[in-house]
Amino acid sequence: MSSIYGIALRGIQQGLASASDNADKLSRSFEPPSSDSSVTIAPDESDGTDAIIGLKLAEHQVKSSAVIIEIAQKLDDSVLDIMA
């Protein structure tokens, strides 16, 4: 059962990291372009749409991983009931 928890916790960590990265990208998409011509904005950073989609995907990943933890807890309870 511990591997189920490990997988779920890793999913939550990855989802939170992805949410953080996408929130950063989204906030940078609102910054005005630099007057320095040597600084270019990558195409994926110029529009916040990809960052918003990434935030939603990260949200789903965290929620799905939380459901896995709930299921693992139910499995643990079932095993305890069987052994009792």
Image (tube, rainbow, N blue to C red):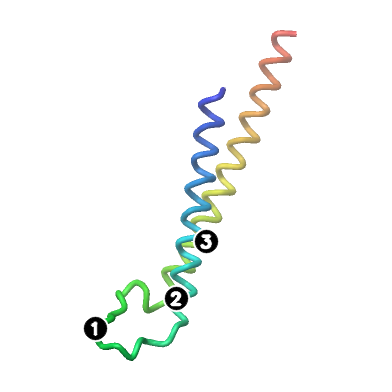
Residue 44's place in the image compared with 54, above or below, is below
Say whether disc 1 or disc 2 marks the residue closer to the N-terminus: 2
| Mark nearer the viewer, 1 or 3 | 1
Q: Residue furthest bottom?
A: 35
Q: Are marks 1 and 3 in contact (CB under 8 Å)?
A: no
The quarter in which the N terminus is drawn is top right
Image height of 18 relative to 2, above or below: below
Could you say which disc has been placed on residue 38 in the image?
1
Amino acid at dot 2: Arg
The image shows residue 53 at horizontal and vertical percentages of 47, 65
Helix, strand or loop status at disc 2: helix
Q: Is residue 59 above or below residue 36?
A: above
Look at 25% across and 88% down and name the residue there.
Answer: 37
Q: Residue at x 61, y 35 (%)?
A: 69
Outermost residue on the left side: it is 38
Looking at the image, is mark 1 or mark 2 nearer the viewer? 1
Q: Which residue is mark 3?
A: 56
- Distance, label 3 to label 2, CA atoms, is 18 Å
Earlier along the polypeptide chain: callout 1 or callout 3?
1
Near-viewer residue (14 or 62): 14
Instruction: Name which quarter of the figure residue 34 lies in.
Output: bottom left
Residue 28, labelled with which disc?
A: 2
Question: For mark 2, does the 10 Å Cα neighbourhood hold few (<14), some (14 to 19), or many (20 or more) residues?
Answer: some
